[in-house]
Structures are given as structure tokens and as C-alpha cells.
Amino acid sequence: MPDPLSVPARQDLLSRTALGVFRLNGQFLSVSEELARPAGLTAARWQVLGAVLREPLPVAGIARAMGITRQSVQRVADLLAADGLAEYVQNPAHRRAKLLRPTEAGRAAIARIDPGHTALASRLTAALGETGLAETAAALERLSAALAAIASENREAS
């Protein structure tokens, strides 16, 4: 069994991981802006609309799923509704927390992103291989789940 990593080595791995995720976030935001632009959307609008394509969700639910603040989702959701790309509908589970759902215009805007999205997925798959891309997604999901568990433990301890 190999020696466990020293504390400084663990800290270095955490720092490298965080910096890599920050860099990836910037890269994904940049490419998302490029992909969304022909559809007349921003990355933020695409993100919120994409969250409600399968089923309408309350703003708080969208925020939880994406790990962003409810206030930022509310601002984008209100803009989408004002532009006719989404609408608020009654929530049978909660009288005051309405559900956001895309309109036909919102679905059409998302559909205009699909060709660029498909091309990027193909290029990343070619660069990393199907297994490599799947392993990358799985590693990021595990990292997110571990950070969520640590945050939950910290909330319970305080």
C-alpha cells in the first residue's frame, strides 16, 4: 500500500482541482455564449431554459439543480418571461412558488442551439474518446457530490 499523501500534497491537489474547475467554468461559459448567440440567447438564459425543458420547475428548484442563487435565476427567468421565451404557471404543490416553463418560442430558440451543441459534443468526443469524456463527466459528478456532502455535514455541525 503506497504512503498516504502529505498534507501539503493534498492541499496542492485541491488547489490544482479548484483552479482547473475555475478555468473550465470560464471556458464553458465562453463556448456557451458562442453557441447561444445565434439563437438570440445568452449562456445564462440557455441554462435556465434548459433546466425546464423536461418539466416546469420553481425558480428555487432551478437554482438548487444548478448550484446558483435563487435571485440570479429569478432575474433571468423574469427576463425570459418578458421576452416570451418562458412563462410562469400555477404550481399545484405550492400556491406562491410558480413554475417556469418554456414557451414554443423558447423551445425553438433552444432548438437553434442544437447543431452547434452537437458539433461541440462530437469534437470533444473525438479529442477525449467516448470513454474519456464519460470518465470526465463521472469524475466531475463525483467531485460535486463529495462537495455537497461536505457542505451538508458542515451545515449539520453548526
Image (cartoon, rainbow, N blue to C red):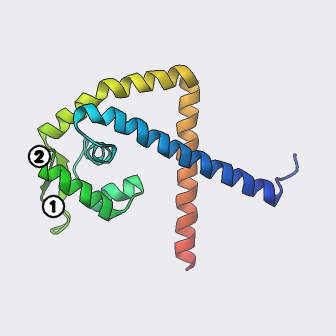
Above or below for 85 versus 97:
above
Residue at 57 percent across and 77 percent down: it is 157
Residue 146 in the image, given as x and y percentages of width and height: 58, 55
**Towards the viewer: 30 or 80:** 30
Q: Position of residue 86 (x, y in %)?
A: 16, 48
Disc 1 packing (10 Å; few <14; some 14–19; many ≥20): few
Going by the numbered disc 1, the residue's amino acid type is: Pro
Relative image position of residue 140 (x, y in whole percent): 55, 44
Residue 8 found in image quarter: bottom right
Q: Is residue 21 above or below residue 120?
A: below
Q: Residue at x 84, y 53 (%)?
A: 4
As measured in the structure, the alpha-carbon distance from the residue carrying label 2 to the one carrying label 1 is 23 Å
Q: Is residue 144 left or right of residue 48?
A: right
Residue 18 appears left or right of 92: right
* Residue 144 % position (x, y): 53, 52
Which mark, residue 92? 1
Q: Tag 2's secondary structure?
A: loop
Q: Classify mark 1: helix, strand or loop.
A: loop
Residue type (three-letter) at the residue carrying disc 2: Gly
- The quadrant of the rendering that contains the C terminus is bottom right
**Residue closest to the eye, 84 or 144:** 84
Whether residue 100 is visible, yes or no, is no
Question: Disc count in the image?
Answer: 2
| Direction from residue 4 to residue 50 in the image, left or right | left
Labelled disc at residue 84: 2
